[in-house]
Amino acid sequence: MSIVRKGVIVTSGCSGWKIVVVDDRDGDTGGYYLYLKKSDIEGADYWFEHEAGLQAQLVDFEVEWIV
């Protein structure tokens, strides 16, 4: 797995949450992971088989990308 992008969500109900996009196409699951983290105890993750699904989810967030 390799991290593709990191950032912070700046709008929506998830404002301030950290966001990480991971490419696992060559890994065990294939596809992409999207991790959202508010704190050490609150977060969410999503898996997408294709990049199109990932991009469709990302349009819901305005993100200040770091990487």
Image: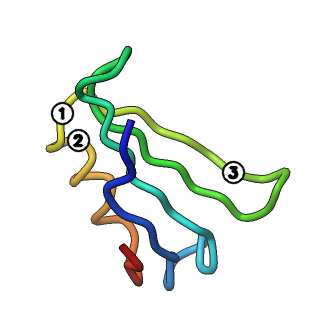
Hey, what amino acid is under mark 1?
His
The reply to whether dot 2 and dot 1 touch (C-beta < 8 Å) is: yes
**Mark 1 Cα within 10 Å, few/some/many (few <14, many 20+)?**
few
User: Residue visible at 36% across and 73% down?
Assistant: 67
Q: In which quadrant will I find the N terminus? A: top left
Q: Which residue is mark 3?
A: 43
Residue 50's disc is: 1
Q: Is residue 26 left or right of residue 47?
A: left
Which label is found at residue 53? 2
> In the displayed structure, does residue 11 sit left or right of residue 59?
right
Q: CA distance from mark 2 to mark 1?
A: 6 Å
Mark 3 and 1 residues: CB-CB less than 8 Å, in contact?
no
- Report if the CB atoms under discs 2 and 3 are less than 8 Å apart: no
Judge from the rendering whether residue 33 lies leftward or rightward of residue 44; answer left or right: left
Helix or strand or loop: what does disc 1 sit on? loop
Q: Earlier in the sequence, mark 3 or mark 1?
A: 3
Pointer 2 or 3: first along the chain: 3
Under mark 3, the amino acid is Gly
State the SS at label 2: helix
